[in-house]
Amino acid sequence: MKRLIARLDVKGENLIKGIHMEGLRVIGDPQVYATDYYLGGADELLYIDLVASLYGRSNLIEIVTRACENIFIPLTVGGGVRGVEDARKLFIAGADKVALNTAAVANPIVLTEISQEFGAQCVVLSIEAKRKQDGCWEVLTECGRQSTGLEVGEWLDTAQRHNIGEVLVTSVDCDGARGGFDEALIEYACRHSSVPVVASGGFGSLTDACVAFEKGADAIAIGSALHFKKISIIDIKHHLSNEKYEIREVN
Amino acid sequence: MKVAVVDYEMGNLFSLQNALKAISHSSFLTRSRKEILNAEHVILPGVGSAEPAMTRLRNYELIDALIERSKRGGLTSGICLGMQLMATASTESVCQSVQCLNLIPATVNLIAGARSKSEDIKLPSIGWYKTDINPPEGNEHNGWLGRFDGQRFYYIHSYHLSVSTQNDMYGSYNYAHQKIASVVGSGPNLAVQFHPEKSGATGLEFLSCLVSRKA
Protein backbone atom coordinates (compact mmCIF):
# COMPACT_ATOMS: atom_id res chain seq x y z
CA MET A 1 0.00 0.00 0.00
CA LYS A 2 1.27 3.43 -0.95
CA ARG A 3 1.22 6.70 0.96
CA LEU A 4 0.95 10.31 -0.05
CA ILE A 5 2.77 12.67 2.30
CA ALA A 6 2.37 16.43 2.24
CA ARG A 7 5.75 18.05 2.80
CA LEU A 8 5.99 21.39 4.59
CA ASP A 9 9.40 23.05 4.63
CA VAL A 10 9.51 25.66 7.35
CA LYS A 11 11.76 28.49 8.43
CA GLY A 12 10.96 30.17 11.72
CA GLU A 13 7.19 30.14 11.93
CA ASN A 14 6.63 30.21 8.18
CA LEU A 15 5.91 27.69 5.49
CA ILE A 16 8.51 28.24 2.79
CA LYS A 17 9.58 26.71 -0.47
CA GLY A 18 12.79 26.86 -2.42
CA ILE A 19 14.06 25.47 -5.67
CA HIS A 20 16.97 23.03 -5.35
CA MET A 21 16.80 24.00 -1.68
CA GLU A 22 17.69 27.62 -2.37
CA GLY A 23 15.86 30.90 -2.83
CA LEU A 24 13.51 30.17 0.03
CA ARG A 25 10.21 31.96 -0.50
CA VAL A 26 7.66 32.51 2.28
CA ILE A 27 4.31 31.00 1.44
CA GLY A 28 2.27 31.39 4.60
CA ASP A 29 1.13 29.89 7.89
CA PRO A 30 2.08 26.19 8.01
CA GLN A 31 -0.92 25.40 10.21
CA VAL A 32 -3.38 26.61 7.56
CA TYR A 33 -1.74 24.51 4.86
CA ALA A 34 -1.31 21.48 7.13
CA THR A 35 -4.97 21.52 8.13
CA ASP A 36 -5.97 21.80 4.48
CA TYR A 37 -3.83 18.79 3.56
CA TYR A 38 -5.14 16.74 6.48
CA LEU A 39 -8.75 17.43 5.55
CA GLY A 40 -7.86 16.97 1.88
CA GLY A 41 -6.73 13.38 2.40
CA ALA A 42 -2.97 13.45 3.05
CA ASP A 43 -1.79 10.22 4.66
CA GLU A 44 0.97 11.85 6.67
CA LEU A 45 2.62 15.23 7.08
CA LEU A 46 6.35 15.88 6.88
CA TYR A 47 7.82 19.03 8.42
CA ILE A 48 11.41 19.94 7.65
CA ASP A 49 13.02 23.01 9.17
CA LEU A 50 15.38 24.10 6.44
CA VAL A 51 17.55 26.39 8.49
CA ALA A 52 17.62 24.76 11.91
CA SER A 53 21.10 23.34 11.59
CA LEU A 54 22.27 26.71 10.29
CA TYR A 55 20.91 28.76 13.18
CA GLY A 56 21.03 26.04 15.81
CA ARG A 57 17.38 26.54 16.81
CA SER A 58 13.94 26.05 15.42
CA ASN A 59 10.23 26.69 15.89
CA LEU A 60 9.43 23.07 15.16
CA ILE A 61 8.12 22.32 18.64
CA GLU A 62 5.58 25.15 18.44
CA ILE A 63 4.57 24.16 14.92
CA VAL A 64 4.09 20.49 15.87
CA THR A 65 2.23 21.32 19.09
CA ARG A 66 -0.24 23.44 17.13
CA ALA A 67 -0.62 20.78 14.44
CA CYS A 68 -1.42 18.05 16.94
CA GLU A 69 -4.35 19.95 18.36
CA ASN A 70 -6.54 19.27 15.35
CA ILE A 71 -4.61 17.07 12.93
CA PHE A 72 -4.88 13.34 13.51
CA ILE A 73 -2.52 11.76 11.01
CA PRO A 74 1.15 10.89 11.55
CA LEU A 75 3.73 13.67 11.63
CA THR A 76 7.38 13.26 10.72
CA VAL A 77 9.59 16.13 11.78
CA GLY A 78 13.16 16.98 10.79
CA GLY A 79 15.69 19.75 10.58
CA GLY A 80 18.32 20.26 13.25
CA VAL A 81 17.52 17.09 15.19
CA ARG A 82 20.84 16.37 16.90
CA GLY A 83 20.11 13.49 19.24
CA VAL A 84 17.91 11.80 21.82
CA GLU A 85 16.95 14.95 23.73
CA ASP A 86 15.90 16.89 20.60
CA ALA A 87 13.90 13.83 19.53
CA ARG A 88 12.28 13.53 22.96
CA LYS A 89 11.07 17.14 22.88
CA LEU A 90 9.54 16.60 19.46
CA PHE A 91 7.82 13.35 20.49
CA ILE A 92 6.42 15.03 23.60
CA ALA A 93 5.09 17.79 21.35
CA GLY A 94 3.28 15.17 19.26
CA ALA A 95 5.63 14.10 16.48
CA ASP A 96 5.53 10.42 15.52
CA LYS A 97 8.84 10.16 13.68
CA VAL A 98 11.97 12.27 13.56
CA ALA A 99 14.09 12.68 10.43
CA LEU A 100 17.85 13.08 10.71
CA ASN A 101 20.40 14.05 8.10
CA THR A 102 23.27 16.28 9.23
CA ALA A 103 23.55 14.79 12.72
CA ALA A 104 23.39 11.22 11.38
CA VAL A 105 26.15 11.82 8.85
CA ALA A 106 28.33 13.40 11.53
CA ASN A 107 27.72 10.52 13.93
CA PRO A 108 25.60 7.56 12.74
CA ILE A 109 25.44 6.16 16.28
CA VAL A 110 22.81 8.83 17.02
CA LEU A 111 20.39 6.74 14.92
CA THR A 112 20.86 3.76 17.23
CA GLU A 113 20.58 5.95 20.31
CA ILE A 114 17.26 7.38 19.23
CA SER A 115 15.87 4.03 18.09
CA GLN A 116 16.90 2.32 21.33
CA GLU A 117 15.12 4.97 23.32
CA PHE A 118 11.98 5.40 21.21
CA GLY A 119 11.84 2.45 18.83
CA ALA A 120 13.28 2.08 15.34
CA GLN A 121 9.97 2.94 13.66
CA CYS A 122 10.37 6.50 14.94
CA VAL A 123 13.67 7.08 13.15
CA VAL A 124 13.74 8.34 9.58
CA LEU A 125 17.05 8.71 7.76
CA SER A 126 16.80 11.81 5.60
CA ILE A 127 19.07 11.90 2.56
CA GLU A 128 19.56 14.95 0.35
CA ALA A 129 21.07 13.62 -2.85
CA LYS A 130 22.79 15.53 -5.61
CA ARG A 131 23.81 13.97 -8.90
CA LYS A 132 27.51 13.97 -9.66
CA GLN A 133 29.28 14.02 -13.01
CA ASP A 134 29.94 10.26 -12.85
CA GLY A 135 26.21 9.47 -12.56
CA CYS A 136 26.31 8.63 -8.86
CA TRP A 137 24.71 10.74 -6.13
CA GLU A 138 26.43 12.55 -3.31
CA VAL A 139 24.90 13.05 0.13
CA LEU A 140 24.55 16.72 1.08
CA THR A 141 23.92 18.00 4.58
CA GLU A 142 22.81 21.31 6.10
CA CYS A 143 19.84 21.44 3.71
CA GLY A 144 21.85 21.19 0.56
CA ARG A 145 24.58 23.58 1.69
CA GLN A 146 27.31 21.13 2.61
CA SER A 147 29.08 18.58 0.49
CA THR A 148 30.12 15.36 2.25
CA GLY A 149 31.87 13.23 -0.36
CA LEU A 150 29.63 10.35 0.73
CA GLU A 151 27.99 8.24 -1.94
CA VAL A 152 24.27 7.58 -1.39
CA GLY A 153 24.38 3.77 -1.67
CA GLU A 154 27.39 3.53 0.62
CA TRP A 155 25.71 5.81 3.15
CA LEU A 156 22.48 3.79 3.03
CA ASP A 157 24.39 0.58 3.71
CA THR A 158 26.19 2.18 6.66
CA ALA A 159 23.09 3.80 8.12
CA GLN A 160 21.03 0.63 7.97
CA ARG A 161 23.48 -1.11 10.24
CA HIS A 162 21.85 1.15 12.81
CA ASN A 163 18.23 0.59 13.56
CA ILE A 164 16.15 2.88 11.36
CA GLY A 165 12.50 2.70 10.37
CA GLU A 166 12.31 4.58 7.10
CA VAL A 167 14.37 6.47 4.54
CA LEU A 168 13.42 9.84 3.06
CA VAL A 169 15.29 10.51 -0.19
CA THR A 170 15.16 14.05 -1.55
CA SER A 171 16.61 14.90 -4.92
CA VAL A 172 18.28 18.29 -4.61
CA ASP A 173 18.44 18.49 -8.42
CA CYS A 174 14.68 18.06 -8.83
CA ASP A 175 13.49 19.80 -5.68
CA GLY A 176 10.97 22.57 -6.25
CA ALA A 177 11.11 22.36 -10.03
CA ARG A 178 7.99 20.23 -10.44
CA GLY A 179 9.59 18.57 -13.41
CA GLY A 180 9.37 14.99 -12.15
CA PHE A 181 11.26 12.87 -9.63
CA ASP A 182 14.81 11.65 -10.12
CA GLU A 183 13.62 8.15 -11.07
CA ALA A 184 17.06 6.59 -11.16
CA LEU A 185 17.77 7.89 -7.66
CA ILE A 186 14.54 6.40 -6.33
CA GLU A 187 15.28 3.03 -7.92
CA TYR A 188 18.84 3.08 -6.58
CA ALA A 189 17.79 4.01 -3.06
CA CYS A 190 15.08 1.35 -3.00
CA ARG A 191 17.58 -1.31 -4.08
CA HIS A 192 19.76 -0.35 -1.13
CA SER A 193 16.99 -0.22 1.44
CA SER A 194 15.13 -2.88 3.41
CA VAL A 195 13.02 -0.27 5.19
CA PRO A 196 10.26 1.76 3.49
CA VAL A 197 11.42 4.58 1.21
CA VAL A 198 9.77 7.98 0.80
CA ALA A 199 10.63 9.73 -2.47
CA SER A 200 10.78 13.51 -2.39
CA GLY A 201 11.75 16.30 -4.76
CA GLY A 202 10.24 17.07 -8.15
CA PHE A 203 6.64 15.91 -8.10
CA GLY A 204 4.79 17.99 -10.70
CA SER A 205 2.17 15.91 -12.47
CA LEU A 206 -0.10 12.94 -11.88
CA THR A 207 2.11 10.50 -13.76
CA ASP A 208 5.05 11.33 -11.49
CA ALA A 209 3.31 9.52 -8.64
CA CYS A 210 3.08 6.24 -10.56
CA VAL A 211 6.66 6.54 -11.72
CA ALA A 212 7.94 6.81 -8.16
CA PHE A 213 5.97 3.75 -7.06
CA GLU A 214 7.05 1.76 -10.09
CA LYS A 215 10.63 2.41 -9.08
CA GLY A 216 9.93 0.96 -5.63
CA ALA A 217 9.04 3.92 -3.43
CA ASP A 218 6.56 3.21 -0.63
CA ALA A 219 5.49 6.81 -0.30
CA ILE A 220 5.88 10.13 -2.06
CA ALA A 221 6.34 13.50 -0.40
CA ILE A 222 4.87 16.47 -2.23
CA GLY A 223 5.60 20.12 -1.50
CA SER A 224 5.40 22.89 -4.03
CA ALA A 225 2.82 21.22 -6.30
CA LEU A 226 0.43 21.34 -3.35
CA HIS A 227 1.47 24.71 -1.87
CA PHE A 228 1.10 26.48 -5.22
CA LYS A 229 -2.18 24.68 -5.83
CA LYS A 230 -1.02 23.05 -9.06
CA ILE A 231 -2.67 19.79 -8.16
CA SER A 232 -4.86 18.41 -5.39
CA ILE A 233 -4.44 15.38 -3.15
CA ILE A 234 -7.79 14.02 -4.24
CA ASP A 235 -6.77 14.16 -7.92
CA ILE A 236 -3.51 12.38 -7.24
CA LYS A 237 -5.24 9.67 -5.24
CA HIS A 238 -7.95 9.15 -7.86
CA HIS A 239 -5.26 8.77 -10.48
CA LEU A 240 -3.35 6.25 -8.37
CA SER A 241 -6.55 4.30 -7.71
CA ASN A 242 -7.30 4.20 -11.41
CA GLU A 243 -3.80 2.90 -11.99
CA LYS A 244 -4.57 0.10 -9.50
CA TYR A 245 -2.31 1.23 -6.68
CA GLU A 246 -3.59 0.51 -3.18
CA ILE A 247 -4.05 3.92 -1.61
CA ARG A 248 -6.24 5.27 1.17
CA GLU A 249 -9.23 6.80 -0.57
CA VAL A 250 -10.28 10.40 0.06
CA ASN A 251 -13.92 10.77 1.11
CA MET B 1 -16.12 10.50 31.21
CA LYS B 2 -12.56 10.96 32.25
CA VAL B 3 -10.20 8.52 30.63
CA ALA B 4 -7.02 7.59 32.47
CA VAL B 5 -3.99 7.39 30.18
CA VAL B 6 -1.09 5.46 31.66
CA ASP B 7 2.01 7.64 31.56
CA TYR B 8 5.14 5.52 31.68
CA GLU B 9 6.92 7.99 29.42
CA MET B 10 6.48 5.98 26.26
CA GLY B 11 3.84 6.84 23.78
CA ASN B 12 2.51 9.84 22.02
CA LEU B 13 0.52 11.09 24.99
CA PHE B 14 -0.10 14.60 23.69
CA SER B 15 -1.67 13.37 20.45
CA LEU B 16 -3.77 10.83 22.30
CA GLN B 17 -5.08 13.42 24.73
CA ASN B 18 -5.84 15.80 21.86
CA ALA B 19 -7.68 13.02 20.06
CA LEU B 20 -9.74 12.25 23.16
CA LYS B 21 -10.50 15.96 23.52
CA ALA B 22 -11.62 16.09 19.89
CA ILE B 23 -14.19 13.39 20.66
CA SER B 24 -15.31 15.18 23.83
CA HIS B 25 -13.61 12.99 26.38
CA SER B 26 -11.46 14.52 28.99
CA SER B 27 -8.43 12.55 30.02
CA PHE B 28 -5.65 12.65 32.53
CA LEU B 29 -2.18 11.15 32.64
CA THR B 30 -1.56 8.82 35.52
CA ARG B 31 1.05 6.75 37.28
CA SER B 32 -1.09 6.21 40.35
CA ARG B 33 -2.21 2.75 41.40
CA LYS B 34 -5.36 4.20 42.94
CA GLU B 35 -6.29 6.12 39.81
CA ILE B 36 -5.65 3.12 37.60
CA LEU B 37 -7.81 0.89 39.77
CA ASN B 38 -10.68 3.38 40.00
CA ALA B 39 -10.81 5.01 36.57
CA GLU B 40 -13.85 4.34 34.43
CA HIS B 41 -11.59 3.59 31.51
CA VAL B 42 -7.84 3.15 31.19
CA ILE B 43 -5.80 3.44 28.02
CA LEU B 44 -2.38 1.84 27.86
CA PRO B 45 -0.61 3.63 24.99
CA GLY B 46 2.86 2.87 23.73
CA VAL B 47 5.48 3.61 21.13
CA GLY B 48 8.86 1.94 21.30
CA SER B 49 9.84 -1.55 22.33
CA ALA B 50 8.71 -4.06 24.92
CA GLU B 51 11.78 -4.39 27.10
CA PRO B 52 12.24 -0.74 28.11
CA ALA B 53 8.46 -0.41 28.36
CA MET B 54 8.10 -3.26 30.86
CA THR B 55 11.09 -1.92 32.79
CA ARG B 56 9.41 1.45 33.12
CA LEU B 57 6.07 -0.08 34.10
CA ARG B 58 7.90 -2.07 36.74
CA ASN B 59 9.83 0.97 38.01
CA TYR B 60 6.63 2.97 38.29
CA GLU B 61 4.97 0.02 40.05
CA LEU B 62 2.18 -0.12 37.52
CA ILE B 63 2.25 -3.81 36.60
CA ASP B 64 0.29 -4.98 39.64
CA ALA B 65 -2.18 -2.11 39.28
CA LEU B 66 -2.99 -3.05 35.69
CA ILE B 67 -3.29 -6.76 36.49
CA GLU B 68 -5.47 -6.07 39.53
CA ARG B 69 -7.68 -3.73 37.48
CA SER B 70 -8.19 -6.47 34.94
CA LYS B 71 -9.06 -9.03 37.66
CA ARG B 72 -11.68 -6.62 38.97
CA GLY B 73 -13.17 -6.30 35.49
CA GLY B 74 -12.02 -2.73 34.88
CA LEU B 75 -11.99 -1.81 31.20
CA THR B 76 -8.54 -1.28 29.72
CA SER B 77 -7.68 -0.52 26.09
CA GLY B 78 -4.22 -1.01 24.64
CA ILE B 79 -2.81 0.86 21.62
CA CYS B 80 0.13 -0.29 19.51
CA LEU B 81 2.97 -1.14 21.92
CA GLY B 82 0.33 -0.98 24.65
CA MET B 83 -1.42 -3.87 22.88
CA GLN B 84 1.80 -5.85 22.79
CA LEU B 85 2.45 -5.25 26.47
CA MET B 86 -0.94 -6.78 27.25
CA ALA B 87 0.31 -10.08 25.78
CA THR B 88 2.01 -12.83 27.77
CA ALA B 89 5.52 -12.38 26.44
CA SER B 90 7.46 -10.64 23.71
CA THR B 91 10.59 -11.69 21.85
CA GLU B 92 11.41 -8.04 21.15
CA SER B 93 14.59 -8.02 23.14
CA VAL B 94 18.28 -8.48 22.53
CA CYS B 95 18.77 -11.33 24.95
CA GLN B 96 15.61 -13.08 26.03
CA SER B 97 11.87 -13.20 26.08
CA VAL B 98 10.30 -10.22 27.86
CA GLN B 99 7.52 -11.10 30.30
CA CYS B 100 4.57 -8.81 29.72
CA LEU B 101 1.27 -8.20 31.47
CA ASN B 102 -0.54 -11.36 30.34
CA LEU B 103 -3.90 -9.61 30.15
CA ILE B 104 -4.50 -11.21 26.76
CA PRO B 105 -2.92 -14.65 26.31
CA ALA B 106 -0.64 -14.14 23.33
CA THR B 107 2.96 -13.92 22.24
CA VAL B 108 4.69 -11.13 20.36
CA ASN B 109 7.18 -11.82 17.57
CA LEU B 110 8.83 -10.10 14.65
CA ILE B 111 6.70 -10.21 11.51
CA ALA B 112 8.17 -13.18 9.65
CA GLY B 113 9.29 -13.29 6.05
CA ALA B 114 10.32 -9.67 5.91
CA ARG B 115 13.63 -7.83 5.53
CA SER B 116 14.20 -9.93 2.45
CA LYS B 117 14.98 -6.88 0.26
CA SER B 118 11.97 -7.90 -1.81
CA GLU B 119 9.92 -4.91 -2.87
CA ASP B 120 6.76 -5.91 -1.05
CA ILE B 121 7.99 -6.90 2.31
CA LYS B 122 9.79 -4.27 4.27
CA LEU B 123 9.76 -3.69 7.99
CA PRO B 124 8.31 -1.80 9.73
CA SER B 125 4.90 -2.32 8.20
CA ILE B 126 3.82 1.28 7.58
CA GLY B 127 0.54 2.28 6.02
CA TRP B 128 -3.19 2.74 6.13
CA TYR B 129 -4.34 -0.85 5.84
CA LYS B 130 -7.85 -2.15 5.27
CA THR B 131 -8.73 -3.96 8.46
CA ASP B 132 -11.00 -6.99 8.63
CA ILE B 133 -12.94 -6.85 11.87
CA ASN B 134 -15.12 -9.84 12.77
CA PRO B 135 -15.51 -10.56 16.45
CA PRO B 136 -16.82 -14.08 17.08
CA GLU B 137 -20.59 -14.65 17.21
CA GLY B 138 -22.15 -13.64 20.50
CA ASN B 139 -19.14 -11.56 21.48
CA GLU B 140 -20.19 -8.41 23.35
CA HIS B 141 -18.12 -6.22 21.02
CA ASN B 142 -19.90 -7.47 17.93
CA GLY B 143 -22.22 -4.51 17.73
CA TRP B 144 -19.86 -1.58 17.54
CA LEU B 145 -16.65 -3.29 16.38
CA GLY B 146 -18.27 -4.81 13.33
CA ARG B 147 -19.16 -1.32 12.04
CA PHE B 148 -15.46 -0.72 11.37
CA ASP B 149 -15.00 -3.85 9.28
CA GLY B 150 -13.15 -2.93 6.09
CA GLN B 151 -12.04 0.51 7.28
CA ARG B 152 -8.46 1.72 6.95
CA PHE B 153 -6.33 2.48 9.98
CA TYR B 154 -2.72 3.61 10.31
CA TYR B 155 -0.16 0.99 11.26
CA ILE B 156 3.54 1.34 11.99
CA HIS B 157 5.14 -1.71 13.60
CA SER B 158 7.55 -4.58 13.10
CA TYR B 159 6.30 -6.91 15.84
CA HIS B 160 2.90 -8.53 15.97
CA LEU B 161 0.65 -10.46 18.34
CA SER B 162 -0.30 -14.13 18.02
CA VAL B 163 -3.21 -14.97 20.29
CA SER B 164 -3.30 -18.27 22.17
CA THR B 165 -7.08 -18.50 21.80
CA GLN B 166 -8.47 -17.89 18.31
CA ASN B 167 -11.64 -16.40 19.81
CA ASP B 168 -9.57 -13.54 21.23
CA MET B 169 -8.71 -12.31 17.76
CA TYR B 170 -11.33 -9.84 16.58
CA GLY B 171 -9.60 -8.26 13.63
CA SER B 172 -6.63 -8.49 11.31
CA TYR B 173 -5.00 -7.00 8.23
CA ASN B 174 -2.87 -8.58 5.53
CA TYR B 175 0.86 -7.93 5.34
CA ALA B 176 3.88 -10.02 4.37
CA HIS B 177 1.52 -12.72 3.09
CA GLN B 178 -0.07 -13.33 6.48
CA LYS B 179 -2.89 -12.13 8.69
CA ILE B 180 -1.54 -9.69 11.25
CA ALA B 181 -3.58 -9.23 14.45
CA SER B 182 -5.21 -5.79 14.48
CA VAL B 183 -7.82 -6.06 17.22
CA VAL B 184 -7.64 -8.52 20.11
CA GLY B 185 -9.51 -8.88 23.37
CA SER B 186 -9.98 -10.93 26.48
CA GLY B 187 -12.39 -10.17 29.31
CA PRO B 188 -12.40 -6.42 30.00
CA ASN B 189 -9.30 -5.87 27.87
CA LEU B 190 -9.37 -4.79 24.26
CA ALA B 191 -6.36 -3.76 22.24
CA VAL B 192 -5.49 -2.50 18.78
CA GLN B 193 -2.26 -2.63 16.81
CA PHE B 194 -3.08 0.49 14.80
CA HIS B 195 -3.11 4.08 16.05
CA PRO B 196 -6.71 5.31 16.26
CA GLU B 197 -5.39 8.74 17.31
CA LYS B 198 -3.50 8.95 14.01
CA SER B 199 -6.09 7.41 11.72
CA GLY B 200 -8.02 10.54 10.83
CA ALA B 201 -11.78 10.78 11.25
CA THR B 202 -12.28 7.00 11.18
CA GLY B 203 -9.73 6.61 13.94
CA LEU B 204 -11.40 9.22 16.10
CA GLU B 205 -14.74 7.48 15.66
CA PHE B 206 -13.15 4.18 16.63
CA LEU B 207 -11.48 5.75 19.65
CA SER B 208 -14.80 7.16 20.76
CA CYS B 209 -16.44 3.72 20.59
CA LEU B 210 -13.44 2.12 22.24
CA VAL B 211 -13.53 4.28 25.37
CA SER B 212 -17.33 4.32 25.55
CA ARG B 213 -17.71 0.54 25.44
CA LYS B 214 -19.45 -1.13 28.32
CA ALA B 215 -18.18 -4.17 30.20
Image (spheres, grey):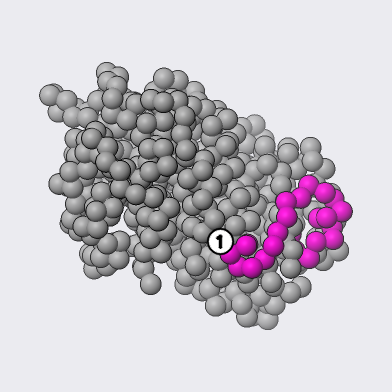
Residue under the point 24% across and 58% down: A229
Q: Kindly tell me whether residue A150 is visible in this rendering.
A: no
Residue B38 highlighted magenta (yes or no): yes
Horizontal relation, residue A12 to residue B28: left or right:
left
Residue B182 highlighted magenta (yes or no): no
Residue under the point 37% across and 58% down: A37
Please provide percent x and percent y for residue B188.
Answer: 75, 66
Q: Using the image, determine if residue A103 lies above or below residue B194.
A: above
Q: Quarter holding the N terminus of chain B?
A: bottom right
Q: Quarter holding the C terminus of chain B?
A: bottom right
- Quadrant assignment, res B90: top right
Q: Nearer the viewer, residue A140 or B103?
A: A140
Q: Which residues are magenta?
A: B20-42
Please provide percent x and percent y for residue B28.
Answer: 73, 55
Q: Kindly tell me whether residue A220 is visible in this rendering.
A: yes
Q: Nearer the viewer, residue B98 or A30?
A: A30
- Residue at numbered disc 1: B196
Horizontal relation, residue B31 to residue B183: left or right:
right
Residue under the point 41% across and 20% down: A106
Please provide percent x and percent y for residue A144.
Answer: 28, 28
Q: Nearer the viewer, residue B132 or A210?
A: A210
Q: Nearer the viewer, residue A162 or A51?
A: A51
Q: Using the image, determine if residue A112 lies above or below residue B14.
A: above
Chain at numbered mark 1: B
Residue type pointed to by label 1? Pro
Please provide percent x and percent y for residue A143.
Answer: 32, 30
- Quadrant assignment, res B67: bottom right
Give the SS element for disc 1. helix
